[in-house]
Image (cartoon, helix red, strand yellow):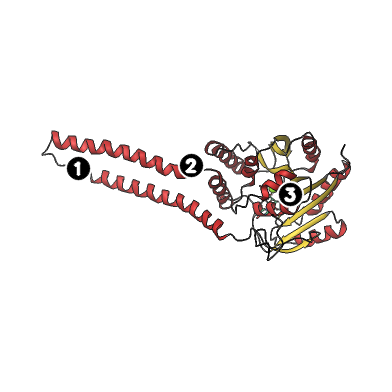
Amino acid sequence: MEDRKDLISVVAPVYNEDAVLDALYERVKAVLDGAGEMWELVLVNDGSRDNSAAVIARLHEQDPRVKGISFSRNFGFQIAATAGLDFARGDAVILTDADLQDPPEVYPAMLEQWRAGYDVVYGVRSSREGETWFKLATAKIFYRLIHRITSIDIPLDTGDFRLMDRRVISSLRGMNERNRFLRGMVPWIGFRQIGVTYHREARYAGDAKFTSVKKMLPFALDAITSFSYFPLQLATIMGFITAALSVIAILAVILIRLLAPHEPLLGQATTLVVVLFLGSVQLISLGIIGEYLGRIYDEVKGRPLYLIQDSWGLEDAPLGRFAPPSAVGNPGR
Ligand code: UDP
Ligand code: MG
């Protein structure tokens, strides 16, 4: 065994989770102390409107291995997870939901694979509890779609629950995009990756946040636009198809004119249908370009990924991730 003990970081984004944080701490502690590990728990309060911040502060008082930051407002799961990974100091970092759907009892199996030489150990859900059929069905369609239209291999039935080696975390820090889809970014990084299956439990307490189509659609769009140009190519494909159809139609009209010069050409309805169809194809294509353009605009503005209001046990917590290093400390580089 190595002489220096590995530090294991557990990172959990927190949004209105005051009812679960104590239980999360107890279970992480039981598992990692039980395994004789040196560890820290990094909680990222993503602008909660309940008492999550106070609970994090109290847990930190109680046990300094619990560390935390509070954002100035809600920035969303992907950004909260990114901040947690920025501040975690572990040799291995485990990203988990705060609601105990990803049971800490899986950590030892993940650590075992990591020590066997794997850089990423992702959790593969063998079964899911307490989730609606709608969520299960849309998730299934979404991952099959992503699998088809992107070049990266996102393992099926995985979420964000995964262990990452320090060099994967460093690689992630070099990926500064604002529209972050970690489930795709980590496979993109490569290195040696492996899955461990686990039973995804029902949420311990509180309410699930990613339930409505309104919340899931932007996530899906970010995922697709981050990793695929297929929607853009769709416009080209549609263009070629309609061009081919037009050639056939033009030839048909010429033929009718030659064979029956005195017959009037009917087809007002046809004209209307064709115009409406092409009009909608053009509008949809514009919308698709708009989705990419808006994201390019976000990137170009170069705003900080997140803003921090409070921190516990993380003295070097800066105000924003990509603010100029001269203005504030920058953990990214
Ligand atoms: N979460 C977050 N910011 C948000 C929404 C959710 O940090 O804007 C956190 C939440 O506290 C939890 C994790 O993301 O730790 C997963 O959320 P949830 O359990 O609601 O999602 P689900 O399990 O239904 O996918
Ligand atoms: Mg959950």
What residue lies at 52% left-to-right and 57% top-to-bottom?
A: 297
> Is 236 displayed left or right of 122 in the figure?
left
Q: Residue furthest front?
A: 326
* Crowding at mark 2 (Cα within 10 Å: few <14, some 14-19, many 20+): some
Mark number for residue 17? none
Q: CA distance from mark 3 to mark 2?
A: 35 Å
Q: CA distance from mark 2 to mark 1?
A: 38 Å
- Residue occupied by mark 2: 230
Amino acid carrying label 1: it is Leu
Question: Quick check: marks 1 and 3 in contact, CB under 8 Å?
Answer: no
Q: CA distance from mark 1 to mark 3?
A: 65 Å
What residue lies at 78% left-to-right and 51% top-to-bottom?
A: 89
Element under disc 2:
helix
Question: Quick check: marks 3 and 2 in contact, CB under 8 Å?
Answer: no
Q: Earlier in the sequence, mark 1 or mark 3?
A: 3
Q: Is mark 3 within 8 Å of ligand 2?
A: yes
Q: Earlier in the sequence, mark 2 or mark 1?
A: 2
